Image (spheres, rainbow, N blue to C red):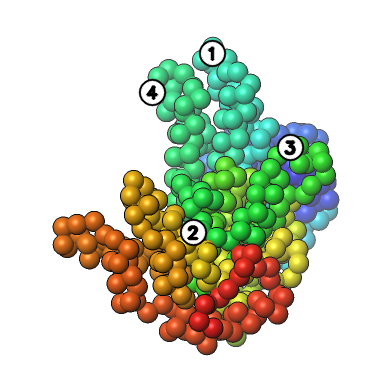
Amino acid sequence: MAFSEEFALLLRARYPLIYVSTLEEERLEGAIAKISQDQGKRGVYTWDFVDGYQGNPTDAGFAQRNPLQALELVERLSPNVAAVIVLRDFHRFLDDISVARKLRNLGRLLKSQPKTIVMVSHQVEVPDDLKELITILEFPLPSIVEIEAELTRLLAGLGKPMDQSTMDGLVQSCQGLSIERIRRIIARAIATHGELRSSDLSLVLEEKRQTIRQTQILDFYPTQETMEDIGGLDNLKAWLLRRGAAFSERARQYGLPHPRGLLLVGVQGTGKSLTAKAIANHWHLPLLRLDVGRLFAGLVGESESRTRQMIQLAEALAPCILWIDEIDKAFAGFEGRGDSGTTSRVFGTFITWMAEKQSPVFVVATANNIQALPPELLRRGRFDEIFFVGLPNQEERKAIFSVHLQRLRPQTIKDYDLSRLAYESPDFSGAEIEQMIVEAMHIAFSQNRDFTTDDVLEAASQMIPLARTAQEQIQQLQQWAEAGRARLASRQAQLSDSF
């Protein structure tokens, strides 16, 4: 249900106290004013701590710096007068015993009157004694329709119409931004060259990065990696290529649902994170990286608020890729943590969203220790598929050497014996192969010459791969995969040549 419909329904049902969480105070108050006008021309009274009540000449300045007096205005209004009382930043006063008691008293009174108190805040903070009385609503970021209407209004003043294809691209790019930020982008473009051009989409991208950076929850991750940068993993790449057009309108008309996500489980350094970046690049979608640790905050209720904020932002930027690296470290053993159930509630909110989301947010999660993941996360419906990414076999190692040497020495790659390198490097992961080449370059650079196949092999002889130092854990992971609990990312999957 859209916010306007739900808010109007609560007004008609005479809900006494509504709490709306948003950073867009101005846009919310405009929406409340419109809904109130449509609902029998209800009067709207707006209060903040500094200026008191505003907009109504009779009550202008009333209750300045006095939140308890602000609530008394409700009783001063005639019982039959339909009204909406908007209280800005009122969450800061809810711990005051007199304010809380007054709200509970008004809750009883307003059940029989056409009045509703709306508290507006950037975050949800409701004391336990008021939870039964307050209804919480979230005000979503602007929809495509709202963004296009705002852009049309802003561009109308320039007298330079924009063609529809450019407008559609700009509207899609602006998804996930507040109306205020969109206005700043337009103002910056006009101040630069007097008009809005298709090249100004870079300004939108930069504003998105700034928005995401300020949340300190998500990172807007640039991607340059391609599918060709991934050596091996043929089954996984084929699966991804089949879903390349799954976010298109043609797929919707065909009846295909949006792809939900992918869980990549396997040994460290085998290309799981690289795959996430390559997916975003290949599908031409923005990549958002979630550090789950940032969801957890010290204040009670703030972790859950951050989780909802993350979900709202990801859905507003959809279609997009949400990359969650090492998800096993975030939710491992959460049932036994002494955090008053915060981790459990965050996890519950997250997996419920994953199961029920309708937005085109494709979740790519990576994990090294599958045993640490809660069973609920692995249930069908959270992810489209779970892939096991093991250590590369000999053919895949040859492909990985080729990828790195083609990037570093494209002119002389034929001088390297790729087959020998692949044969002589059992148990090495893709990341370890890359480090092996780097070490070979150091050896040759110190002798003022180019590195050779022998330098790479010498570097390999000095390295101890993870497959040997953590052999028991990796064998357990291989046994889990071989039991048929995940699809193999490689056609000839092999955890280690020496096992």
- Residue at image coords 42%, 28%: 188
Circle 3: element type: helix
> According to the image, label 4 marks what residue?
192
Task: Give the Cα separation between the discs numbered 4 and 1.
Answer: 15 Å
- Residue placed most toward the observer, 121 or 273: 273
Query: Which percent across, then down, holds residue 356?
Result: 75, 58
Q: Identify the residue at image location x=48%, y=65%.
A: 397
Quadrant location of the C terminus in the rendered image: bottom right
Secondary structure, mark 4, is helix
What distance separates the C-alpha of mark 4 from that of mark 3? 35 Å
Q: Disc 3 or 2, which lies upstream in sequence?
A: 3
Amino acid carrying label 1: it is Lys
Q: Characterize the local packing of mark 3: few (<14), some (14-19) or many (20 or more) Cα atoms within 10 angstroms.
A: few
| Dot placed on the residue nearer the N-terminal end, 4 or 3 | 4
Residue corresponding to mark 1: 160
Nearer the N terminus, badge 4 or badge 2?
Answer: 4
